[in-house]
Image: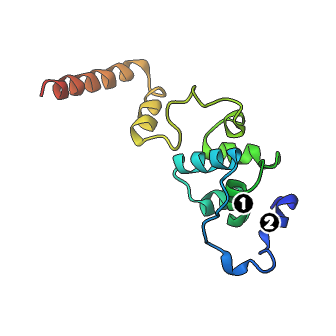
Amino acid sequence: MYPENQLYSQPMAGKAGLAGRPSKKKATESGARLAALRKQAGLSQAALAEAVGIPQRTISFYEREAEAIPSTLVPALAKKLGVSMEELLGINDGAQRSKRGPKSQLKRQLESVATVPRQQQQKILDVVEAMIAHHGAR
């Protein structure tokens, strides 16, 4: 756990009954970006929090109220969300990535084709091309 995040891991005095209610505040720019990237990665706040070792309430705070994400969390969050640190911080718009989140099964399998000998790669490509041609003929 990150020491500076312990501040947000404890319920605020007098606010314990408000847990789970949507905030009436408009999310900050960095918070909205974090929430959008988290959703695009298919993660809940709890799953993201567990992956980076902080409480779910802290992720909620960063998404709804915090002006910025602590620099100590940026690398871990970016890695888990599958984006660059620059994209997480809003330094670029992510135009270089057409899709965020986990890779599809097909993409993972096609990437593994690159590890087989070239002659076998050609056989796989021939089969794929034949299937595409057959599907396109319908």
State left or right for residue 110 relative to residue 70: left
Disc 1, disc 2: CB below 8 Å?
yes
- Mark 2 falls on what kind of element? helix
Q: Residues within 10 Å of mark 1 (few under 14, many from 20)?
A: some
Camera-nearest residue between 100 and 31? 31
Which image quadrant for residue 56? bottom right
Camera-nearest residue between 60 and 26? 26
Residue at image position (70%, 66%) is 57
Q: Amino acid at mark 1?
A: Phe
Q: Amino acid at mark 2?
A: Tyr
| Farthest left residue in view | 138
State left or right for residue 25 relative to residue 2: left
Q: Which image quarter holds the N terminus?
A: bottom right
Residue at image position (85%, 66%) is 7
Which image quadrant for residue 51? bottom right
In percent of width and height, residue 30 lies at: 70, 45
Location of mark 2 (residue)? 8
In percent of width and height, residue 36 lies at: 57, 47
How far is mark 1 from mark 2, CA to CA?
8 Å
Q: Which image quarter holds the C terminus?
A: top left
Location of mark 1 (residue)? 61
